[in-house]
Image: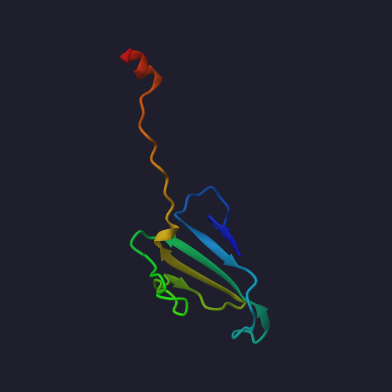
Amino acid sequence: MTYTKNKSNTIKEINGFFANFDSGAVIKNPNTDKQCTLSIEMELKCDEQIIWDEPENDSVPGKGPVPEMFTGISDSCDIKVAVPYKGACHYTPKPEKSISAGSVILIL
């Protein structure tokens, strides 16, 4: 599994990230009837309003949001999904306000 900030590795700022699962199960592709290795690309998009519920116990999964996009299995055995998630938001810390050296000299 790999994580990237954006697919094209450009400097373009995005608020979220991608998780790629390249080595999935070997399946019979329903579109081509051929064996293939399943690959999933998941985009987790920042959405401050979306919080995934924690599971009640180990046997019951937590409830997540409805995906914004889901492609199903392509001919090349890929699945792409985009999901909103508060945990995908990128926060830049605000700089602390302090006085400059020039201000200190003026005060003295």
Q: Nearer the viewer, residue 77 or 104?
A: 104
Quadrant (top left/top right/bottom left/bottom right) for the C terminus: top left
Q: Residue furthest right?
A: 35
Give the quarter of the image for residue 29: bottom right
**Image coords of residue 102 (percent x, y):** 38, 17
Q: Residue furthest left?
A: 107
Q: How is the image coloured?
A: rainbow
Identity of the residue drawn at 42% across and 70% down = 68
**Image coords of residue 66 (percent x, y):** 40, 73
Q: Is residue 42 above or below residue 10?
A: below
Q: Nearer the viewer, residue 60 or 39?
A: 60
Q: Nearer the viewer, residue 80 or 31?
A: 80
**Image coords of residue 80 (percent x, y):** 53, 71
Give the quarter of the image for residue 36: bottom right
Identity of the residue drawn at 64% across and 78% down = 25
Q: Residue furthest front?
A: 57
**Image coords of residue 78 (percent x, y):** 59, 73
Identity of the residue drawn at 42% across and 49% down = 91
Quadrant (top left/top right/bottom left/bottom right) for the N terminus: bottom right
Q: Residue furthest top?
A: 108
Identity of the residue drawn at 47% across and 63% down = 44
Q: Is residue 92 left or right of residue 71?
A: left
Q: Nearer the viewer, residue 4 or 33?
A: 4
